Image (cartoon, rainbow, N blue to C red):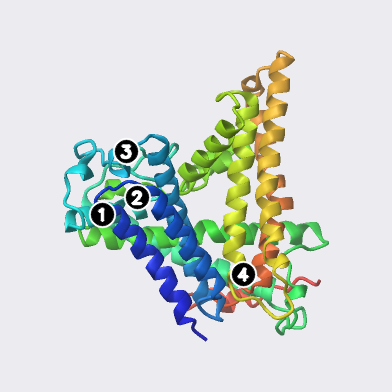
Amino acid sequence: MANSIAKILHIVLLVVQLLFLASPHFPGRNQILIIWIVTLAAASYAVGPVSDDPANAQPYTLLWSIWLATIEKCITAIRNNGRIEDHYWRNDRKPREASAMNSFGLQKLKWVAALMFNSRLVRWNLQVKNVPVASAQTRGRFLAVEISRLVKLVLVTDLLLQLGIRLFWTHPDGGRFESSKELAIGHPEILWSFGKVVVFACGPYFFMSMNYVAASIVAVALGLSVPADWPPLFGNIGDAITVRQFWGTFWHQSMRRPFTTFGHLAIDFFNIPRGSTLAFHVQIWTAFAISGFMHAQAMATLPRPYDITAAETTAGIMRFFLWQALAISIEDLVQRLFEHLGFEVERFGRLRFILGYLWVTWGMWVSLPCAADVMMRLRLTEKSFLSFTIFGPLVDYLPIPKV
């Protein structure tokens, strides 16, 4: 059943950001916009999920990434005693380009939309760190390559969805799990345990990549952007030999700037010198705590089965993200200890990479079920969101793991 009020509030929240940022600057604009965002976000959650179907409701719960980034931009402007227009501009345009645009004009509305939806600020003056470099391609070549990638990503997505249905959602007797409390990706046998975590872990990577590539094809084909605006969403998994590099280099950097800014707020509030070891750890824990909270609140606003409590839709998410902060702190302290003892980590050569990959893999193996079990209990991806399947009949031959 659709919740029209919730849907309207989510849409109004987007429109309010667009109009405020396109308006002429006036005293208190940034502060007022923050109040509006927080109020509308709280109201949208108070009225309940957009739909009783988690698959239909989930896209609206993901809009937090947009309004949280807008709050961060407002905070940045407030801390620098300026306007948002004074801090953001595209690299191929004049600095502070929006200052010369007519308020509410089409040009400024397009500028605001680009600012809001370009989460990594690709080709802007404040592009986030560690965004992969886009290869120089003509429009035709870009479309040909991306269409080929999209076909491959759709096929892998179909395989992962069908594996998930078989491994996660199918009861050993071949039926459906009636109680959501029974749903979990863990397994007492080590091979099944590792295999199920791998299948679940690959899901977000390929699902997000598929949507990103599809959006890039549409945008470039319609002339709304150029190939350079679409660098790869993810980095090189080969660089992820520490948990810190996994999140800071390999994983998408879409929310890096907001989390970094909030981390700076934390260390400035406690008067911790920037660049110090303590500042590093406070910033890491702040970033992952906020990330965990925002992901958890998104899960909490989805419709949940009758036998699942609110805590069961949030606690696991928080544990997962706080584990990442703990892992980064541990590996940083270990590296500092090695340096203090006179060892150079780089001299370990290939062994350093092997141990690094094992560490990151083990960390994800033991921590991912915390978050995955939440999504299981909410029955996300219980059914394939694709309108077809190629691998379904083949996956049906796979044995179902006994619980």
Looking at the picture, which amino acid does disc 4 mark? Leu
Above or below: residue 280 compared with residue 66: above
Residue under numbered circle 3: 87
Looking at the picture, which amino acid does disc 3 mark? His
Lower sequence index among marks 3 and 4: 3
Lower sequence index among marks 1 and 2: 1
The residue under the point 48% across, 45% down is: 258
Tag nearer the camera, 3 or 4? 3
Residue under numbered circle 2: 29
Residue under numbered circle 4: 163
Count of number-bearing discs? 4
Q: Horizontally, is 305 left or right of 51 in the view?
A: right
Foreground: 248 or 231?
Answer: 248
**Residue at the limit of the structure toward the right, as seen here:** 188
Q: Quadrant of residue 82?
A: top left
* Image location of residue 389, percent across then percent down: 50, 77
